Image (spheres, rainbow, N blue to C red):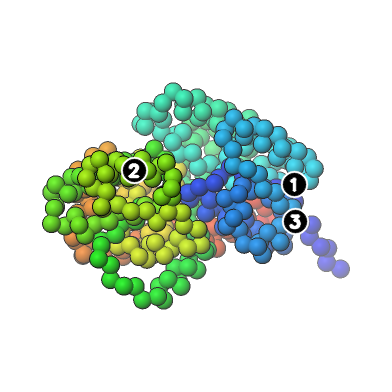
């Protein structure tokens, strides 16, 4: 008689990640593991994830908790509540989708790392308060003494040095696009697109200072001065809620510089419908000063849209020759890159071709990423890897 394989009781803490690419990673992982019969899942999420998880997925999760999104001082109190949940269910293993955890798990733990700014403090010249926060977060990672998972070899090297962490406890699983992005992209491609009156460049990100959005807007001043006959055809499309203070700040900056006519925002877009923004745009731009990784690159390659990117080590590692690079600190240089991508059709075509190759070489598919995540969890919990 075949012995029934005992399920791994896994506690997932996805309470910290509420915006940006990390949210996509969390959603894809939870959707996948909920369907896997080898795991009994105790899942802790925040309202942002709860709103986008399918009802079917929620019914497949053995235990499901929704914790509020709170500021850092209250995360320790929330961590105490999560610690009580762990004590109640006694999981075999804990996965913190993106850390640091503000509690110390009793079970062996894997934590995701996506705090790229922490590794570039000297280059970014971060303020003292942020340095203090980064110091606390670093201590939290060290306190847990957990395994860590990152999305690039570059981040692994920098993180190991920064935390003085054993590199054998840091694993690399490359970023990818979400299954919902691929599904919606296939649907969107079947819809006949109307020719746009604008050359629309998508800026797909939440607002953070390191995203460098202010310089991106100010680059439009140079574009307007140098290419007055073309600027009325240009539109930068952001993905920041229009009712937010961050959008008002960006819009006022544009208005004060006379370039507000050349920006717009799609507002909040659910993860499942993000692909439509790529399809309706002619190019994609990422002006970030630092990233630990980002879904923007594989999403641009997959949707066959030319990519403009900051010339930084994190970008060149992931994009190779499949992007048009610019100096993110030079607003005129950003404007020149926008002009080049807007007027050079052969360059756009070539970048798209290279992007398809780089997507294949540098990024796992959504299914491949899930298999790597699952196998890592099985391995670390001393189970047989498929």
Closer to the camera: disc 3 or disc 2?
2
| Element at label 2 | helix
Q: Nearer the viewer, residue 83 or 112?
A: 83
Q: Residues within 10 Å of mark 2 (few under 14, many from 20)?
A: some
Residue 132: give x, y in percent of width and height.
Answer: 50, 24
Q: Earlier in the sequence, mark 2 or mark 1?
A: 1
- Give the residue at x 45% y 39%: 116
Gap in Å between the C-alphas at discs 1 and 3?
A: 14 Å
Quadrant in the picture for residue 103: top right
Query: Considering depth in this image, is 171 or 99 the residue closer to the camera?
Result: 99
Q: How many marks?
A: 3
Quadrant for the C terminus, please.
bottom right
Tag of residue 250: 2
Task: Name the mark nearer the viewer: 1 or 3.
Answer: 3
Mark 1 lies on a secondary structure that is loop
Q: Residue under circle 3?
A: 62
Q: In front here: 333 or 54? A: 54
Label 3 CA crowd tier, 10 Å (few <14, some 14–19, many 20+): few
Q: CA distance from mark 2 to mark 1?
A: 46 Å
Q: Residues within 10 Å of mark 1 (few under 14, many from 20)?
A: some
């Amino acid at each position: 008689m075949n012995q029934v394989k005992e399920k791994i009781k896994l506690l997932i803490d996805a309470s910290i990640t509420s915006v940006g690419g990390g949210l996509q990673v969390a959603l894809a992982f939870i959707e996948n593991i909920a369907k896997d019969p080898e795991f009994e899942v105790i899942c802790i999420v925040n309202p942002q994830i709860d709103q986008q998880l399918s009802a079917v997925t929620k019914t497949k999760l053995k235990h499901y908790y929704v914790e509020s999104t709170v500021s850092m001082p209250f995360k320790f109190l929330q961590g105490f509540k999560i610690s009580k949940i762990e004590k109640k269910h006694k999981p075999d293993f804990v996965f913190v989708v993106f850390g640091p955890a503000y509690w110390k798990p009793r079970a062996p733990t894997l934590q995701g790392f996506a705090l790229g700014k922490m590794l570039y403090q000297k280059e970014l010249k971060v303020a003292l308060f942020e340095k203090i926060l980064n110091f606390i977060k670093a201590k939290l990672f060290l306190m847990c003494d957990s395994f860590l998972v990152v999305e690039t070899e570059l981040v692994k090297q920098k993180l190991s040095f920064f935390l003085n962490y054993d590199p054998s406890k840091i694993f690399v699983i490359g970023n990818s696009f979400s299954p919902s992005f691929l599904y919606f992209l296939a649907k969107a491609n079947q819809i006949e697109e109307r020719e746009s009156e604008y050359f629309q460049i998508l800026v797909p990100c939440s607002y953070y200072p390191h995203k460098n959005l202010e310089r991106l807007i100010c680059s439009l001043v140079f574009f307007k001065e140098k290419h007055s006959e073309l600027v009325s055809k240009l539109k930068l499309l952001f993905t920041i809620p229009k009712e937010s203070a961050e959008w008002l700040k960006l819009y006022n900056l544009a208005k004060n510089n006379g370039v507000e006519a050349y920006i717009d925002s799609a507002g909040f877009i659910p993860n499942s419908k993000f692909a439509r923004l790529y399809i309706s745009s002619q190019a994609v731009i990422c002006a970030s000063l630092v990233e630990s990784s980002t879904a923007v690159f594989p999403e641009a390659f997959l949707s066959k849209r030319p990519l403009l990117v900051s010339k930084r080590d994190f970008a060149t590692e992931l994009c190779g020759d499949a992007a048009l690079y610019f100096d993110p600190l030079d607003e005129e240089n950003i404007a020149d890159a926008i002009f080049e991508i807007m007027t050079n059709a052969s360059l756009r075509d070539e970048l798209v071709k290279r992007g398809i190759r780089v997507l294949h070489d540098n990024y796992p598919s959504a299914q491949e990423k899930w298999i790597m995540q699952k196998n890592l969890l099985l391995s670390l919990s001393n189970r047989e890897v498929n």
